[in-house]
Amino acid sequence: MDSMNAWSRHNVAFGPSPGALCFGTPGGAVIEIEIDGKQVTEHEVLAGSGVTALTATASGELVVAGHDGTLLVLSGGRAAPAEASTAAVTEFLAGTSEAPATDMDQLDLTDGNQTWHPGELGTVTDTSDGDPSWLKIRAAMNRPA
């Protein structure tokens, strides 16, 4: 059970090169595995801090979050300075705030193509294959049993 809990369920992403998967480890490494199984490469990126989340950007960079709060951007196999990433995250967080739960009914929601205004989600019962998962779940919850 301890080894299962040591691994984050958010530490897998497609790698920067085609046909590769990356896994973040509890030891702070990112392991890149070619899907065809021909090569495994281990990158030591967060010495002493486990990888808690890993994702790929549209431009092919990897964003690695560490258990100690470190955030790295890996580009072409090299890590950008942690200070630059940390500063960007700190600046973003300073300029934002969490929406209070009582105001959630006042928000417009969008999937980038369609916008739902307050109150509309309570009546959604039909969806299409292209709709986001959260809308499909909401529609299923709204359908009469």
Image: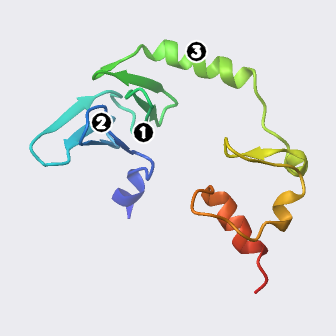
Residue that badge 1 annotates: 54
Of the pair 75 and 41, the residue shown nearer to us: 75
Spot occupied by residue 57 in the image (x, y as percentages of width and height)? 45, 31
> What is the CA distance from the residue labelled 3 to the residue labelled 1?
19 Å
Spot occupied by residue 125 in the image (x, y as percentages of width and height)? 76, 71
Residue that badge 2 annotates: 30
Give the amino acid at mark 3: Ala
Q: Secondary structure under badge 3?
A: helix
- The label nearer to you, 3 versus 1, is 1
Spot occupied by residue 31 in the image (x, y as percentages of width and height)? 25, 39
Q: Residues within 10 Å of mark 2 (few under 14, many from 20)?
A: many
- Relative to 76, is 105 on the left or the right? right
- Relative to 105, is 79 on the left or the right? left
Q: Secondary structure under badge 1?
A: strand
Residue that badge 3 annotates: 87
Cβ atoms under marks 3 and 1 closer than 8 Å? no
Location of residue 132 with respect to 85 vertically, above or below: below
Of the pair 143 and 81, the residue shown nearer to us: 143
The residue positioned 85% from the left and 65% from the top of the image is 122
Of the pair 99 and 5, the residue shown nearer to us: 99
The residue positioned 48% from the left and 26% from the top of the image is 71
- Relative to 116, is 47 on the left or the right? left
Q: Residues within 10 Å of mark 3 (few under 14, many from 20)?
A: few
Q: Indicate which disc residue 139 carries.
A: none
> What is the CA distance from the residue labelled 2 to the residue labelled 1?
9 Å
Give the amino acid at mark 2: Val
Cβ atoms under marks 2 and 1 closer than 8 Å? yes
Tell which circle, 3 or 1, labels the residue nearer the N-terminal end: 1
